[in-house]
C-alpha cells in the first residue's frame, strides 16, 4: 500500500494528474509513476497530463532524480503512452525529455498548458 495518494481525473481522451507534493521527492515521483501505470492499464487511456504547477516547489530537482525517473518512464511505458508534463521549471524540461525519449518514451514537458494539450491530443 502506498503512503501517497495520486488521484486523477479521467477525461474523454486522457488522464490528468495534479502533483501537490515536492517534485524533489524521488519516492513520491516513483509512486506517481506506478499509479500512472496502473491507471493506464485500468482505463485503457494512452495519454497522460501531469500538472506540476501546483507543487509549490521552487527548488531545483536533483539531476539524478530526473534521470532515474526519465529512465523509469521509458521502461514503464515505452512508446505505448504519450505523457505531457506541465511545470514551471522550464530549465529542466529538455533533460527529462531527452532521457525518457532515448528510452523509447513519448514525452513532452513545458510551461504552456495550451501547447502541451495540443501536442498531447495530436496523433503526431
Image: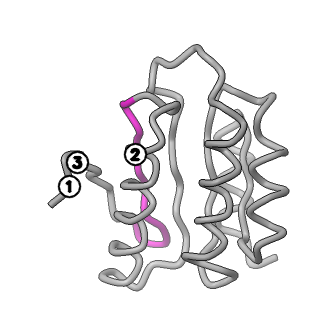
Vertical order, 116 against 22 (above or below): below
Decide: marks 1, 3 in contact (CB < 8 A)?
Answer: yes
Residue annotated with mark 2: 27
| First in residue order: circle 3 vs circle 2 | 3
Coordinates of residue 59 in the picture (x, y in percent): 60, 16
Check the image and name the residue furthest to the top. 58
Q: Which numbered disc covers residue 5?
A: 3
Coordinates of residue 28 in the picture (x, y in percent): 38, 44
Q: Based on the picture, tell me whether residue 72 belongs to the magenta stretch.
A: no
**Residue at figure coordinates x 78%, y 54% from the top left:** 97
Coordinates of residue 61 in the picture (x, y in percent): 62, 29
Q: Which residues are magenta?
A: 11-21
Coordinates of residue 43 in the picture (x, y in percent): 33, 80
Tell me: 6 left or right of 97: left
**Residue at figure coordinates x 40%, y 54% from the top left:** 32
| First in residue order: circle 1 vs circle 2 | 1
Residue annotated with mark 1: 2
Secondary element at image label 2: helix
Decide: marks 1, 2 in contact (CB < 8 A)?
Answer: no
Amino acid at each position: 500500500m502506498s503512503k501517497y495518494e495520486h488521484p486523477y481525473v479521467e477525461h474523454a481522451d486522457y488522464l490528468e494528474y495534479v502533483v501537490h507534493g515536492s517534485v524533489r521527492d524521488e519516492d513520491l515521483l516513483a509512486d506517481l509513476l506506478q499509479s500512472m501505470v496502473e491507471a493506464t492499464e485500468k482505463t485503457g487511456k494512452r495519454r497522460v497530463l501531469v500538472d506540476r504547477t501546483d507543487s509549490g516547489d521552487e527548488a531545483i530537482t536533483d539531476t539524478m532524480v530526473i534521470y532515474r525517473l526519465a529512465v523509469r518512464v521509458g521502461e514503464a511505458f515505452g512508446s505505448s503512452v504519450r505523457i505531457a508534463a506541465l511545470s514551471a521549471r522550464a530549465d529542466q524540461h529538455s533533460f527529462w525529455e531527452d532521457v525518457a525519449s532515448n528510452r523509447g518514451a513519448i514525452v513532452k514537458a513545458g510551461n504552456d498548458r495550451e501547447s502541451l494539450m495540443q501536442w498531447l491530443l495530436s496523433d503526431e
